Structures are given as C-alpha cells and as structure tokens.
C-alpha cells in the first residue's frame, strides 16, 4: 500500500483499489465493505491510516527497498477546476461527479470540502441541475449531483447571487420533485435530496423569490408526503412549508394542494420534533377559513 485508507467499517485498503471498488458499486447503488460486507454509505469517509503508513515506510527502509511509499499529494484547486471543466463533456459527466464525491468524502480534515467551496463545486452542481431541467434530461448524473450537494454548506451570499442570476432554480427543483424513477427507493432518495436542497435555498432566499413560488411546488411536496418518504425528506419538506408560510399567497396554495389533510395524518403518529413542526404549519394554514374547513 502506498497510502493506506481506512473505511468506516475499520478495514484498511490501498486507495486506488477501494476507490475503484466504490465507483463500480455506485453504479449498482449497493456499496459494501469488501471484507466485512457491511453497508458503506455513499458519502462515507475514507480516512488516511497514518500509523500503518509509518510502519510500511519503516519496513521498506529495513528491507533495503529504495521506493518508500509516500501518501498522495493533497488535492489542489487546479485539480478541482479541471474536474469541473470535464463536467461540460456529456461522456464524462457521471464519472466526474462520482470522482468529486469520492474526493469530498475521503479527507478527514475537510480540507477537500473547503477547496470544493473555493472552486465553486456547489454552484456548478446547481447549474448542472438547471441545464438538465432546460434540456429535460433526467439521468444518473443528475441524481449523483444532488447527492453531492448534501455534503456542502452553501454560504448565504452565494445562494442569493445564484437566485438573482437564475430565475428557474425553483422550477428545476419542482421538476425533480415530480420525477418518478422505476425503482421507488430511488425516487424517495432523489426527492429527499431535492427537498433538502430546497430547504437550504428557501432559508436564505429573498422576499421577492418567496413571493414567486408556484402551486406545482407545494402540490409535489404534498404528493411526496402522501406517497411516503424518509425522515430527512419529511423534516426538510416541513421546513420548506414553514419558510413559505410567512406569505399569505403561499399559505393559500398549500391549503389548495391538500397540505392540511396530509399534515394531520402525519401528526397522528409523528415523533415530538416532527409533531411540533406540523402544529406550527397548521397554525398558519388555519388562519384561513379554507384551511380550517
């Protein structure tokens, strides 16, 4: 091994081999540890095993080997920008986004993520989603881009600038929320990522953006809640609705989309944190006669 890497399952691997393994499994959406066969989350961290590296280097010195293993040089901004340039090639898009995901998750000090922010990776992923929306192109590359976005915190000013420069971002996220994959589990994960991104954007959006929201967005969020989603998706959907409740027009659209009924259904069996959110949203929606009815 030249630069031993340890997975969350505690097993150490050669980086080239484990990265190749993870990339091949990402295609099948079933990532596991080769030794333990335990599941490996798609965004699981790969941590450098410095102790083992020192032992390997000592062994090489004691046995007269001239090529002593050294860790890979740290990632630099130029390499990230090169990957973003490859994103423009349709034949390289999926591989590029998967490479970015691996790089973002394999550094225990988060320095890679800082480089990604400096290079504008989150912005590039949102613009990629926007391009897919305009082309009506829905494929695995878009799913991976939305997944990658969950690894980053986007600064407020960057979000505001993106919204000011691109008035179709909300429409593109609404489009993703309406997509139905062949595999229901893929649909749930995809919509969950989309609504989590929507929550991040809406928490920092300007008043003018919030006043331009469309009924389709609320209809699709309600449909997602009705058909079932994961805990992260439910939590994000409720925060989206709560953010939108500050404007009367949005409250009316939520009532008309059937949100009151779905919120009450969820409230009946919801844990404490979710129950508080549903009650807060219902309080706003019931300020209208239609909501109370």
Image: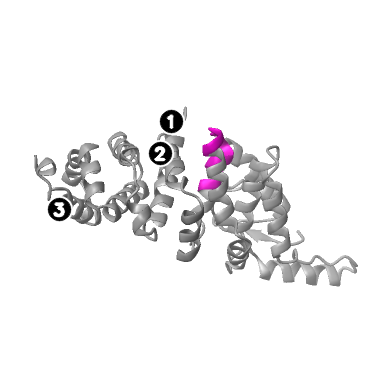
At 50% across and 60% down in the image, what residue appears? Answer: 161
Task: Please state which of residues 94 and 33 is positioned toward the viewer in this rendering.
Answer: 94
Q: Point out residue 230 in the picture as x, y percentages from the top left corner.
A: 36, 44
Q: Secondary structure at mark 2?
A: helix
Between the C-alphas of marks 1 and 2, the distance is 8 Å
The answer to whether one can see residue 30 in this image is no
Horizontal side of residue 28 vs 169, given as left or right: right
Task: State left or right for residue 4 relative to residue 170.
Answer: right
Q: Is residue 143 magenta?
A: yes
- Rendered residue at 42%/31% (across/down): 184
How was the colour assigned to the protein in this rendering?
Answer: one colour
User: Which disc is residue 180 wearing?
Assistant: 1
What is the x, y in percent for residue 5?
Answer: 66, 59
Name the residue that disc number 2 marks: 177
Residue 210 seen: yes
Image side of residue 272 versus residue 22, left or right: left
At 24% from the left and 43% from the top, the residue drawn is 254
Please tell me how crowded label 2 is: few (under 14), some (14-19), or many (20+) other residues with Cα within 10 Å.
many
Residue at the (25%, 42%) spot, across then down: 253
């Amino acid at each position: 091994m030249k630069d031993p890497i340890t997975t969350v399952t505690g097993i150490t691997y050669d980086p080239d081999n484990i990265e190749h393994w993870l990339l091949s499994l990402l295609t099948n959406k079933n990532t596991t540890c080769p030794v333990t066969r335990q599941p490996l989350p798609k965004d699981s961290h790969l941590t450098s095993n410095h102790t083992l590296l020192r032992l390997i280097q000592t062994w090489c010195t004691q046995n007269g080997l001239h090529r002593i293993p050294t860790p890979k040089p740290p990632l630099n901004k130029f390499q990230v920008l090169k990957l973003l340039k490859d994103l423009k090639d349709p034949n390289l898009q999926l591989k590029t986004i998967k490479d970015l995901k691996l790089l973002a998750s394999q550094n225990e000090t988060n320095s890679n993520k800082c480089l990604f922010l400096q290079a504008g990776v989150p912005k590039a992923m949102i613009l990629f989603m926007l391009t897919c929306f305009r082309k009506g192109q829905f494929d695995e590359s878009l799913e991976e881009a939305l997944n990658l976005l969950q690894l980053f915190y986007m600064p407020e000013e960057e979000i505001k600038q993106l919204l000011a420069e691109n008035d179709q971002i909300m429409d593109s996220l609404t489009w993703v929320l309406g997509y139905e994959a062949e595999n229901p589990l893929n649909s749930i994960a995809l919509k969950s990522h989309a609504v989590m991104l929507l929550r991040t954007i809406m928490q920092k959006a300007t008043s003018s953006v919030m006043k331009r929201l469309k009924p389709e967005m609320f209809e699709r969020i309600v449909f997602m809640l009705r058909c079932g989603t994961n805990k992260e998706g439910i939590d994000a959907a409720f925060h989206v609705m709560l953010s939108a409740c500050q404007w009367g027009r949005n409250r009316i659209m939520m009532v008309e989309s059937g949100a009151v009924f779905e919120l009450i259904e969820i409230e009946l069996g919801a844990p404490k944190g979710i129950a508080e959110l549903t009650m807060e949203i219902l309080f706003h929606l019931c300020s209208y006669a239609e909501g109370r009815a």
